[in-house]
Amino acid sequence: MKKLTFEDALQQLQQTVEKLEHGDVTLNESLKLYEKGTRLSAYCADCLKKAQQKITELESDENDTEATE
C-alpha cells in the first residue's frame, strides 16, 4: 500500500464500506472490496496506535521534566 495519510486512508475506507453497503457489486468485487477495507482498517488502526504512543511519550517526557524542576 502506498504511503497514505491517515485522513486519506480513512476516506478510502469509508468509500469502500459505502460500496459494500450499497450491495450492487458482484461477489468477486465484494471480496476485493472487503480485502481492501481490511487493509485500510489495519493501516488506520496502526496510525492511531502510533499517535497514541507518541502522545504517551510526550506526556511522560513532560512529567519527567516537571519532576526534575
Image: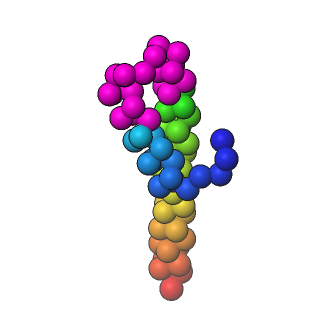
For residue 25, what is the image quadrant? top left
Q: How is the image coloured?
A: rainbow
For the question of whether residue 64 can be seen, the reply is yes
Q: Residue at the location (49% across, 74% down)?
A: 62
Task: Tell which residue pokes out farthest to the left in this image.
Answer: 22
In magenta segment, residue 23:
yes
Q: Nearer the viewer, residue 8 or 23?
A: 23
Q: Which residues are magenta?
A: 16-34
For residue 32, what is the image quadrant? top right
Q: Main secondary structure of the magenta part?
A: helix
Above or below, 13 relative to 61: above
Task: Tell which residue pokes out farthest to the right in this image.
Answer: 2
Above or below, 64 relative to 21: below
**Residue 13 x, y percent position in the rendering:** 45, 40
Q: Residue at the location (52% across, 68% down)?
A: 58
Q: Residue at the location (36% across, 35% down)?
A: 18
